[in-house]
Image (cartoon, helix red, strand yellow):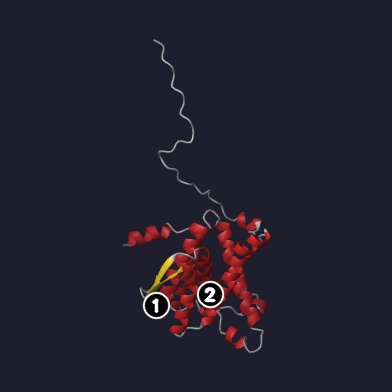
Amino acid sequence: MAQAVEEWYKQMPIITRSYLTAAIVTTVGCSLDIISPYNLYLNPKLVMKQYQFWRLITNFLYFRKMDLDFLFHMFFLARYCKLLEENSFRGRTADFFYMLLFGATVLTGIVLIGGMIPYVSASFAKIIFLSNSLTFMMVYVWSKQNPFIHMSFLGLFTFTAAYLPWVLLGFSILVGASPWVDLLGMIAGHAYYFLEDVYPTMTGRRPLKTPSFIKALFTEEPVVMAQPGNVRFAAPPPEEAHQD
C-alpha cells in the first residue's frame, strides 16, 4: 500500500506535486500547532502596512482543519490539477503555472476590491483563505475544456462535465457551506477560460501569453507521440543484386 502511494505521488507532474505537498504540509502543520493560521491568512492591512507579503501566497496553502472537507478538497486538488497539467497543459508547465498565478491574482483582487464596496464588504471580509476557491477554479477550467465527459455524482445521477461546477455549487449550498468560495472560483475560472480560449478565437490575439521570464523558470519537455510499430515512414533500402 505504501509503495503504491509512493509511486502515485512520484508520477504526479511537478506543479501538482508541489502544490499538493505544500497544502498538506501547511494544513498538517497548523493542525499540530507548529504553524499558526494567524500568520497565513490574507490581511490587506498587514500586507500593505507591515509588508507581510507572504500572506499573498500562504492563504492559498491552508485548507482549514483536517476533516472530511479537507480530504474532499485534497482529492479535487490532486485530480483536476493533475488532469489539467497532464492533458490540456501537457508539455506547457510554464503556461500552467501562469494560469494558477492569474487565478490567484484575480481571486485576491476580487476580495480586496469587494472589501471596499458597501453592503458586501462584510461578506468579503470573512474570506481570509482562498485555497478552496483556487481549487474550484481548476475544476471550472477543466469542465469548460472537457464539457462532454460523462460523470456521476455519488452514484445518484449522471451529467456531463460542463455542469460539474454547478453540481458542486449546489452541493455546497445543500450542506450549508458559503457559496461565495465556489462562486469566486467560478469567476476566476471563467475569466481565464474567456481570455485564453474564447477571446483569441474571436480576435486572433492572446492576452494571457506567458511572460518569457516565467518560461525561463521551467524546462519544457517535448511531447513524444507514440507511433505504431508496424508502420513504415520510409521506403526500405533496395536489395543488392546478386551476380551468379
Report which residue position mark 1 lands on: 68
Q: Which mark is residue 214?
A: none
Q: Amino acid at mark 2?
A: Ser
Q: Label 1 neighbourhood size at 10 Å, few (<14), some (14-19), many (20+)?
A: few
Asked if residue 32 shows in the view, the reply is no
Q: Residue at x 47, y 68 (%)?
A: 161
> In the rendered image, which quarter is residue 94 located in?
bottom right
Residue 105 visible in this rendered orientation of the protein = yes
Location of residue 19 in the rendering, given as x and y in whole percent from the top left corner: 50, 65
Give the percent coordinates (x, y) of residue 206. 66, 60
Q: Secondary structure at mark 1?
A: helix
Which amino acid, mark 1? Leu
**Viewport quadrant of the C terminus:** top left
Q: Give the farthest residue toward the bottom.
A: 119
Residue 199: % across, % down = 64, 64
Q: Residues within 10 Å of mark 2 (few under 14, many from 20)?
A: many
Residue located farthest toward the left when viewing the structure as drawn: 1
Q: Quadrant of the N terminus?
A: bottom left
Q: Which residue is mark 2?
A: 133
- All told, the count of numbered labels is 2
Work out whether residue 243 or residue 60 is closer to the camera in this orientation and state it: 243
Front residue of this view, candidates 111 and 25 = 111
Measured in 3D between alpha carbons, the distance from the residue under mark 2 to the one under mark 1, in whole angstroms, is 17 Å
Q: Nearer the viewer, residue 95 or 226?
A: 226
Q: Residue at x 48, y 70 (%)?
A: 23
Q: Earlier in the sequence, mark 2 or mark 1?
A: 1
Q: Where residue 171 sits in the image (x, y, percent)?
A: 44, 80
**Vertical relation: 64 (above or below) 242:** below
**Based on the displayed image, in which of its 4 quarters is residue 229 positioned?**
top left
- Looking at the rendered structure, the secondary structure element under dot 2 is helix
